Amino acid sequence: MKVGVIEHFDSMHLLPGHPKCGVPHGHTYKVEVTVEGPVVNGMVVDFDILKRSLREILKTWDHTDLNRLLPVPSCEHISEAVLGQLRGKLPGLRMGVRIWEGEGKWAECEG
Ligand SMILES: [Zn+2]
């Protein structure tokens, strides 16, 4: 069974050397987290715990210069980093993090 939560954050970044994205600009990022596992006592994971953990992590990603957090803050690298931070808070869960950069573009990291 899979369950998921969605949160958002707004930040700025640039992709060094990229012809279009190499100048500072902002996005509203959508963060989708999925957790897969057996249903135990009616739940795969407590939504409240999942949401609180994700919101805590995203405080550091919101309204900031993402180039201060990652050398190349692409969707791909953000999804890897957020998944790593979430694993630190919720070990032992099979999770995926999909980062949407505005509408129509996303990257997903699972594990
Ligand atoms: Zn961008």
Image (tube, rainbow, N blue to C red):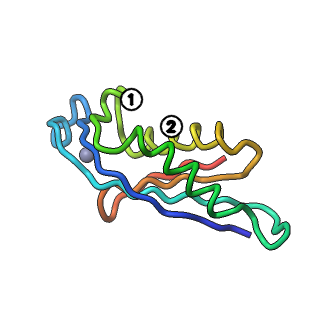
Q: Is residue 43 left or right of residue 5?
A: right
Above or below: residue 31 compared with residue 92:
below
* Residue at 45% in and 56% down: 31
Q: Label 1 sits on what residue type?
A: Leu
- The tag on residue 70 is 1
Q: In terms of image quadrants, where is residue 65? A: top left
Q: Label 2 sits on what residue type?
A: Ala
* Residue at 57% in and 43% down: 83
Q: Are marks 1 and 2 in contact (CB under 8 Å)?
A: yes
Q: In terms of image quadrants, where is residue 2? A: bottom right
The quadrant the N terminus occupies is bottom right
Image coords of residue 34 (percent x, y): 61, 60
Q: Which residue is mark 2?
A: 81
- Disc 1 is placed on an element classified as loop
Image coords of residue 37 (percent x, y): 77, 61
Q: Is residue 77 left or right of residue 24?
A: right
Residue density around tag 2, few if under 14, some if 14–19, many if 20 or more, within 10 Å? some
Image coords of residue 88 (percent x, y): 65, 36
Q: As rendered, which of 57 and 92 lies closer to the eye?
A: 57
Q: Total number of numbered labels?
A: 2
